[in-house]
Image: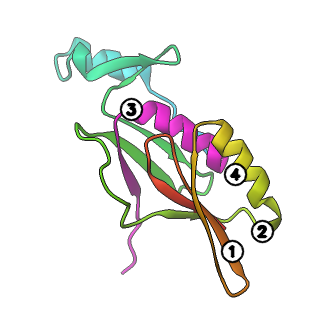
């Protein structure tokens, strides 16, 4: 049996980080269903404190997701602690060797940090960190 997999990132600010990753990957931020949120709050199933406004839209405070057109999804969830050590899992973003430097420049201009460059035989990659310190590789 095969299962779907969702990658989840812990985050201090999931909506801002989801925006960054959506831009980085060319994916879409999942839209918020403001009517559903308001209805749940009105019926007492959720509190106003469970929500916030992000880019002028009412959203759930604790999470945001981005989605690829084929259905792959990445979730960003709020956690109280900040990132303290290196990731044990990271994403390799396959931009192509000819696009690595342009993507590095684009993403660092949007808040990424260059961590290091590496090569193994003919394969080269650039390791960067997103604005909250999560590592990813441009391959």
Q: Residues within 10 Å of mark 1 (few under 14, many from 20)?
A: some
Gap between marks 3 and 4, in whole Å? 23 Å
Gap between marks 1 and 4, in whole Å? 13 Å
- In the image, taking residue 110 as reference, residue 122 lies left or right, namely right
Query: Depth check: 2 or 129 in front?
Result: 129
**Magenta-span inclusion, residue 89:** no
Gap between marks 1 and 3, in whole Å? 31 Å
- In the image, taking residue 2 as reference, residue 131 lies left or right, namely right
Q: Residues within 10 Å of mark 4 (few under 14, many from 20)?
A: some
Q: Which numbered disc, 3 or 4, marks the residue closer to the eye?
A: 4
Which residue has dot 3 on it?
13
Marked residue nearer the N-terminal end (3 or 2): 3
Q: Which numbered disc, 1 or 3, marks the residue closer to the eye?
A: 1
User: Residue 127, position in %: x, y?
Assistant: 57, 61
Q: Are marks 2 and 4 in contact (CB under 8 Å)?
A: no
Which residue has dot 1 on it?
124
Q: Are marks 1 and 2 in contact (CB under 8 Å)?
A: yes
Give the SS element for disc 3. Answer: loop
Which residue has dot 2 on it?
97
Q: Which numbered disc, 3 or 2, marks the residue closer to the eye?
A: 2
- Please provide the residue range marked out in magenta: 1-26
Which residue has dot 4 on it?
104
Q: Are marks 1 and 4 in contact (CB under 8 Å)?
A: no
User: Residue 16, position in %: x, y?
Assistant: 48, 31
């Amino acid at each position: 049996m095969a299962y779907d997999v969702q990658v989840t990132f812990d985050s201090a600010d999931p909506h801002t980080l989801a925006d960054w990753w959506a831009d980085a990957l060319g994916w879409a931020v999942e839209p918020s269903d403001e009517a559903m949120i308001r209805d749940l709050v009105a019926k007492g199933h959720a509190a106003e404190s469970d929500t916030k406004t992000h880019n002028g839209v009412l959203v759930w405070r604790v999470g945001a997701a981005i989605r690829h057109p084929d259905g792959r999804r990445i979730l960003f969830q709020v956690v109280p602690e900040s990132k303290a050590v290196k990731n044990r899992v990271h994403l390799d973003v396959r931009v192509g060797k000819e696009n690595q430097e342009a993507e590095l420049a684009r993403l660092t201009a949007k808040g990424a940090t260059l961590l290091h460059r590496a090569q193994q035989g003919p394969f080269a990659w650039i390791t960067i960190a997103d604005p909250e310190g999560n590592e990813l590789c441009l391959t």
